[in-house]
Amino acid sequence: MKYLIFAMFLLVACSPEDKKSSKPNILLIITDDQSWEHLGCYGDPVIRTPVIDKLASEGVKFENAYTACPSCSPARAALLTGQDIYRLEEGGVLTGFIRDKFEVFPLLLEENGYHVGYTGKGYWPLTSGIPEAIDEPFGKPYKSILHDSVPHGVSRNYYAANFEQFVEENSGGKPFFFLAGLGEPHRPYGYGLGLEMGIDTSRVSIPSFLPDVSVTKVDMADYLGEIEYCDQVVGELLDVLDKKGLIENTLIIFTSDNGMPFPRSKATLYDHGVRMPLIAWWKNKIYGNRVVSDPVSLIDLGPTFLELALVDIPEQFTGRSMTTQLLAMESGQIEADRDFVVTAFEKHTHCRPNELGYPRRAIHTTEWTYIVNHEPHRFPMGNLDIYIPNWDNLGETDPGPTKTYFKQNIDNPDFQNLWNLSFGKVPEEELYNKEEDPHMISNLANDPASSLILDELRKKLNHYLSLTDDPRLRGLSPWDQYRLDK
């Protein structure tokens, strides 16, 4: 039935007399540094996100959505190009750039009649002046309208007003693609913001890899407070659509670029680093109150948008369209062969000798995550003795109160297990049963009882990496030459 529904949708969409009007508007909302579980609709016990929760209840929520990389620039480069980061050369690291030999979906939409733009955080770094680079791959920026005042740590960007300006410039009534790149909940936070917003720190849920102490609870509450601010922004964006009469044919996607900026999260391939919230809403097109369990990647968004816009998907894309998942009537597993996703990491900051990275690859199913660490003799979160000016040491983890607490307790023998989980070296292979161990604490790679699943996932990962031409399978490490000061 689901395939019949999609075929009927395409038949209507391709009708020559209504081809233009059938193309959906697309509003893509991306927060900055948010793990999947921190929304009311994903089960967080304390956060209040009524607007986003309503989108989920009236649309579709993905339980197993993953970013391609737990670092903002490569994650966004992967999303833009529909490709895994190890195929993107300099685009696979934090301060790289996207070469113009790679197609990016917003500009393909623009070439095919879409009005395209963004506000807030698009793709960073800016690459003007580099001849081989694509500058502004999300289209024209709209950033001129600012709030007079905002909570400390929150961007002054008046996201909704800038979106409204973008809509008003679309005098020809073209279908549009717009990125609302929210700067929250990226650090730094205004200390005590969560308490000011009424978040009950006694009910804040602390993952078992973090210390369950008051410092962490307040820090986590500040993070949750910024997500609550994002929920208000989403409501304002929807109000613009409603006021302009555009809500009827606008596909709204809500997600984030990578996981929360806490130890053992961002810049790691554990779930709190790469598992994302992903919600889709499209009035009268998406059946509401659905939960999809298929593992999907954010590199699948570009192919999805292009397919819905009747634009050919480039062969270089490795992502797969999710139109079947969006337009199906049922919940659960929609496509049996969509049973895993792959994530990757090379380097984030220059926190190791010679600016070397920490190359990792992982495969994620609904139950298991298998990680291979190509250089296990290095420190995954950076060296304690390398300090980055205006940043910190252990530089793959953002500075903040929780990280400070870790460093203050480095010599505490009762704290060594937590320290090692977040900042210690790890073995070449890691395997986690997420149904039994949701915070991924117990590595089962050496457990004889798990040897069959370990071998199966190892083979499946290597097969995928071979098909998608990962240089590491050929013993190459070109990322060592991409210096962060260029």
Image (cartoon, rainbow, N blue to C red):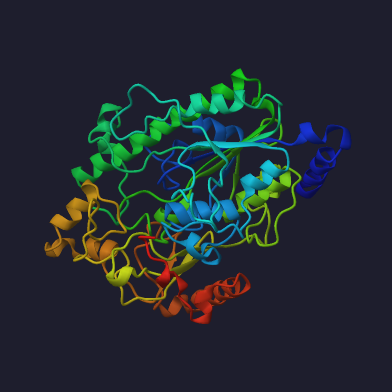
Q: Is residue 239 left or right of residue 414?
A: right
Q: Is residue 470 above or below residue 331?
A: below
What percent of the width, then of the height, locates residue 178? 58, 36
Q: Which is more toward the observer, 128 or 111?
A: 128
| Residue at 85% across, 42% down | 11
Q: Which is more toward the observer, 395 or 388?
A: 388
Q: Which is more toward the observer, 248 or 212?
A: 248
Q: Is residue 297 visible?
A: no
| Residue at 48% across, 63% down | 90
Determine the image quadrant of residue 31.
top left
Q: Is residue 97 above or below residue 181?
A: below
Q: Is residue 95 left or right of residue 414?
A: right
Q: Is residue 30 left or right of residue 442?
A: right
Q: Which is more toward the observer, 66 or 443?
A: 66
What percent of the width, then of the height, locates residue 29? 52, 38
Q: Is residue 293 above or below residue 214?
A: below
What percent of the width, then of the height, locates residue 190? 26, 35
